[in-house]
Amino acid sequence: MADYQGVDFYQFSRNFSDEERGVRDTVRQFVDRSFMPLVREHFKAGIFPTELIPELGSLGLLGSSIKGPGCPGLNGTIYGIICEELERGDSGLRSFASVQGSLVMWPIANFGTEEQKDRWLPELAAGRKVGCFGLTEANHGSDPGGMETRAVKDGDDWILNGSKMWITNANLADVAVVWARTDKGVAGFLVERGTEGFSTNPIHGKYSLRASDTGELVFDDVRIADSNRLPDAIGLKAPLNCLNQARYGIAWGAVGAAADCYDTALRYAGEREQFGKPIASFQLVQQKLVHMLTEITKAQGLSLQMGRLKDDGINPVPIVSLAKRNNVAMALDCARTARDILGAAGITDEFSPGRHMANLESVITYEGTHDIHTLIVGAEITGIPAFR
């Protein structure tokens, strides 16, 4: 097959700057050259291709919009474009970059001390160190306010006890941004691998996000110096603000997964013959392709406008929630439709839609389920929270 040329029916890229187009092309080439040859085997094995982390760092794809020591400091739209191109490869690839940038580097840059920024940001941006984000617990997903992990002050230190579940990069991370309940509310801590009492356990048997590292963080009387606390992270609002940055990237990324499914189905339909002609010539197949293209185009418009608003300093939670819920549901629908067009071939790993379909079943749930994002937007437009 010819190289991927992108899906841009409404020519949204005409609104990109030269820098934005250049980054898009660089990431697209990276995905085609370095990631695509690896993804099938890594998905089968259930492991993330760690050999690509240095290249992700050298290309400036880790924390691209973070401002701080050693960080690229690019605009939010570029970060979105990066996520779209990475998730065209696989949701696990985008998840790695999203966690590293939005959930580890962003809180350090926004809530950390100058010493914490100087120590961690250059290493994380270069991919020399890996981070993870510990908020979700086994019994507290959609309601993080119910977290049971606690940190108790002990002299100049803190003693941390509890566990976190479904943590991306858990078993790869050199540092974990961990959220715990204290006597004065929720606080954030930097917990380094090797700290006594801190351990990680991989989660096996996943049907979804197999080319991604997922695990559990366990804290058993972990002693943490107060210098490892994020001093400006005060209350539950702090980790939720981190999630808003990551959800922004998810909304863009899902469009990339959908575009890959559409592109794969379109190419297959042009080559696969039944009844003496390519199936692309049949009305029902054309209807499915047009539906996919229409929904992708609408989602691209949402993402680009969201990016321009973010670059103007407008990034409220409901705007991101609307795009996350719409774009991920759209991508999952496209993956299922593409699988249908591919017929039996669609359930094999020779083609990507089945892999995207499995991944998106996780993406529609993590960092705010589809229903939770519905209620966030509902509360915004009615003024009436419906969470309880």
Image (tube, rainbow, N blue to C red):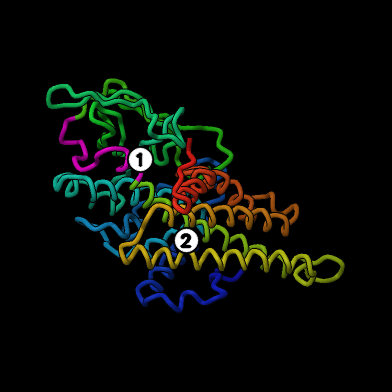
Vertical order, 173 against 101 (above or below): above
Residue at x 30%, y 43% (from the top left corner): 238
- Mark 1 closeness class: few <14, some 14–19, many ≥20 residues within 10 Å: many
Left or right of 249 on screen, residue 7: right
Give the percent coordinates (x, y) of residue 126: 28, 54
Which residue appears farthest toward the front when viewing the image? 383
Residue nearest the viewer, comparing 27 with 284: 284
In magenta, the rendered stretch is 225-240
Residue at x 26%, y 35% (from the top left corner): 187
Q: Tell me the amino acid under the disc marked 1.
A: Phe
In the picture of the structure, the residue carrying the numbered disc 1 is 133
- The quarter holding residue 286 reads bottom right
User: The residue tagged with tag 1: helix, strand or loop?
Assistant: strand
Left or right of 312 on screen, residue 26: right
Which label sits on residue 21?
none
Give the percent coordinates (x, y) of residue 18: 36, 77
- The quarter holding residue 272 reads bottom right
Q: Is residue 214 magenta?
A: no
The quadrant the N terminus occupies is bottom right
Cα gap from disc 2 to disc 1, whole angstroms = 21 Å
Residue at x 20%, y 43% (from the top left corner): 232
Q: Is residue 36 visible?
A: no
- The quarter holding residue 21 reads bottom left
Left or right of 245 on screen, residue 322: right
Residue at x 46%, y 63% (from the top left corner): 303
Give the percent coordinates (x, y) of residue 171: 39, 36
Give the percent coordinates (x, y) of residue 94: 44, 53
In the picture of the structure, the residue carrying the numbered disc 2 is 84
Q: Is residue 228 visible?
A: yes
Q: Tell me the amino acid under the disc marked 2.
A: Glu
Vertical order, 332 against 271 (above or below): above
